[in-house]
Structure formats: structure tokens, C-alpha cells
Amino acid sequence: VPELTLQRGVPRQRDLALSLARTRVAAADTAGRGDRTEAARRGATSQRVITRAEIDRSNATNARQLIEQLRPQWLRARGGNVTLRDTPTADGTAAVSISLPVYLDAQKLGGMSTLADISTTDVELVEFLEPSQAALRFGGDNPRGAIIVTTRAARHVR
């Protein structure tokens, strides 16, 4: 618990606000690093994670369909309403050709088109990492973030 600076026996508003902000940051950090396995076990939903329970409730047959159905915002460019694609659009425009990297069991698999090759029967968890998180985990070559697919086999090995 952060200390408060007292002024005539009353905490100063600034110090109280800073203390509250620090507490919120610490709580958010703990939640961000918290036990995702527990959340997955309970079937809890998150905007950053697709759990096995959600996969079981969906009718998606591959990881691409799964994300399009449950978390389509992952496929939109940050700061805009543009859908990220691996290839140029039908009219030949290449302005939207930036792709999110896909990692399968912590190994780089390729771009978003590889998601269609991953059967949902093999998937335990799908996670979206913001660019800063992706850079910390996999290096700086992830300017749009990253998608991590964890298979059932890999989950049981850990």
C-alpha cells in the first residue's frame, strides 16, 4: 500500500490520486500477467483471449473463422477501421497489405492466411498481443501486434 503524504493530518489530493493510480496500474499489471489458465478453465471471455470453452460454442472449423466470428476487431488495423489482409484487395490496392504475424505454440508460423490451416479441434487458446506486448515477447518485428495460437498438445506439455 503506497504511503500518503500528510498535510496537517489530511492526505493531499494529488498524493491520493497518485496512490489510486498506482494501485490501478498494479492491479492491471497483475491481471495482465494473471493466470490465464484459470480464466480459460472457467470459460471466461476476454477481448484478448479466445478460450477453449468459446471455441467449443462456436461453429468455426479453423482459427481464421474463429477470429472472424468471435474477435473481428483483431483483424482491423489499429487506429482505423481497415481490415488487415495478407494480399491486396480485388481492385489491386495494396495499401492494406500489412499482416499480423501468427505464432503457433510460440513458433512463428507466418501471416494471417496461415490461420485457415489451423483446425479448431487442435486449438486450446488463441490470444491477441498488442504491439508492445508482441515486441517484448517476440522482438520488434510486430508493429501491429501478434496472434498466438496454443494447441491442446502444447498446453498439456507445460
Image: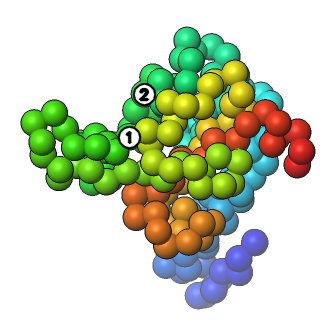
Secondary-structure class at tag 2: helix
Identify the residue under disc 2: 68
Q: Which of 141 and 129 is in front in this view?
A: 141
Q: Where is residue 11 in the image (x, y as percent from the top left)?
A: 60, 78
Identify the residue under disc 1: 75
Relative side of 92 to 71, left or right: left
Q: Position of residue 111 (x, y in %)?
A: 45, 48
- The reply to whether the C-beta atoms of the residues labelled 1 and 2 are less than 8 Å apart is yes
Residue at 63%, 41% (x, y): give it. 149
Q: In this view, does 147 lie above or below 8?
A: above
Residue at the extreme left of the image, as rendered:
91
Q: Which of marks 1 and 2 is nearer the N terminus?
A: 2
Q: Nearer the viewer, residue 46 or 94?
A: 94
Relative side of 20 to 141, left or right: right
Secondary-structure class at tag 1: helix
Residue at 62%, 25% (x, y): give it. 119
Residue at 81%, 42% (x, y): give it. 154
Amino acid type for the residue under numbered disc 2: Glu
Q: Which mark is residue 116?
A: none
Q: How many labels does the image show?
A: 2
Residue at 17%, 50% (x, y): give it. 94
